[in-house]
Amino acid sequence: GRRAFSLNTRKVDCTGKEVSICGWVKNVRKQRKHAFLAITDGQTVKPLQAVISPEQAEKLSTGAAIQVTGRWQSSPGSGQQFELNDVSQVSILGQHDAEHNPIQSKYQTQEYLRTIPHLRGRVTSNAALLRLRSKLIASITDFFDQQGFIQTHTPIVTSSDCEGAGEVFTVSSATEAKDGPQQANKETKVEPFFRLPKYLTVSAQLHLEALSQAVDKVWTLSPTFRAEKSDTPRHLSEFYMLEAEVCFTRSVDDVTQIVENMLRHAAKSLSANGTLEQLQEIRQRAMKEATDEDAKLTTPETLQTRWQGLISPSWPRVKYAEAIQLLQDHVRSGDARFENMPTYDSGFNAEHERYIAEHFGRGSPVFVTDYPRVQKPFYMAPSTATNEGADWGDTVACFDLLVPDLCELAGGSLREHDHEALVVGMADKGVSGENLEWYQDLRKYGSVPHGGFGLGFDRLICYMSGFGNVRDVVAFPRCYESLPP
Ligand code: 4AD
Ligand code: MG
């Protein structure tokens, strides 16, 4: 009997057998005696070829969903190992308006595709991004599981602004006005979520800290929200953050080591399972076909270098003060030129961060540690906490992970675990203890040195895929001043 084969079952040897395949037409190439049909089910970069008659090809066009029944045979053509031949049946599975289809088989720019997020997953490169995200989550889940971390779920609606930056979205509940006579034009009264001010979370960290102090190692991958007016290729209003928290830490390196090992594990396993190869093929095609320069910025070779960097051992660590010094030295010796001179007090801007990642690393990401306290949120522990006697000045035991082209990929720190010091730190930063009593409580009962990190998951997808804009690697991006479907 006939069985519906998914295209990715090509691994199974069914040479000579009659198979039925479901997918979408990528392209039809009509010749006098035959027509060559490229079909995909979205699972592979390379479509599958079916050789059909000109009559069978008559009603087919790019984008139509079809079922094709034929014999699976080795292909005489050079483009593919196998193809579907002796096709007995081609049926169209649903409506398809070929004339108005916004997705065409020719190259379409990411900028254009951003206007049709509900359709762009059908483009080969965008489908590859969906697969990358899925494989990456699987690999990271596997890493944490092996390392004894517990995956947890933290709330989206919270009453705290973890980063204290005031970049929160407020949650309201819309209720119909109950008072007054029924009007044709009913008024809607918007009030805060159950009358208390509530926000969409900017980070799961505070809740992770609570859970960590019950079971030591925890992690989560959850949506986070920032009401910052940053209109850049790296910023979204809604993004996924990968966060982890561990207890019994001695130094910031206990945390950086987890980030490094996790990303190395992911890059290794995704190289081994063919994901990197697919992404390089996508880059290769972009080099050939792209009509927009942006799409050509990351070559297949650059992508290879990035992944090798992720896999390479012992990523460099450089202290903030040293990094500033190095940047200034590079400017003085004429090796570097910046619009703004980096100074200890002004901190890094994106331009400096990119330079650090490109020049102080060895193709790998770079950890910059021990930033001045004034630049960082209230919860960070002082550098001196783990470097008794050393003269660190007023720096905190933290790090930013910087990568070439993209800047900041992750950030983390040791957390202040002393109750009094935390209270002082909050007061210094003007963070009111309101709604954070529970967080202070954690320092009263079985308090323990601990730390963790948060990594911008969508930025990681950008870095590993070579796509330059987070708006292109998220299926339905929400960002400053734009909310498509
Ligand atoms: O540096 P951030 O703000 O750190 C925190 O929120 C900590 N509480 C995390 C922790 O220690 N658990 O954010 C962490 C990462 C950044 O390094 C960046 O990669 C990403 O989240 N990120 C964004 N990604 C996309 N769009 C935005 N608007 C982002 N803001 C931060
Ligand atoms: Mg940060």
Image: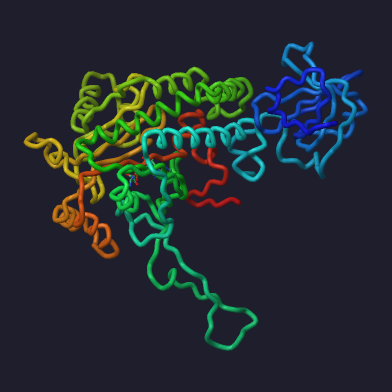
Question: Residue at 77% across / 34% down in the picture?
Answer: 22
Question: Residue at 62% across / 27% down in the picture?
Answer: 291
Q: How many marks are shown on the rendered structure?
A: 0
On-image quarter of the N terminus: top right
Quadrant of ligand 1 in image? top left
Looking at the image, which residue sits at the far left?
389
Residue 132 position in % (x across, y down): 54, 32
Q: Quadrant of residue 253?
A: top left
Residue 448 position in % (x across, y down): 20, 47
In front here: 337 or 423? 423
In front here: 261 or 323? 261
Looking at the image, which residue sits at the far bottom?
181
Residue 444 left/right relative to 235: left
Residue 246 position in % (x across, y down): 29, 42
* Picture colour scheme: rainbow
Residue 480 position in % (x across, y down): 47, 50
Residue 67 left/right relative to 316: right
460 relative to 223, above or below:
above
Residue 253 left/right relative to 226: left
Question: Residue at 39% across / 43% down in the picture?
Answer: 150
Q: Quadrant of residue 127?
A: top right
In front here: 297 or 142? 142
Residue 184 left/right relative to 274: right
455 relative to 417, above or below:
above
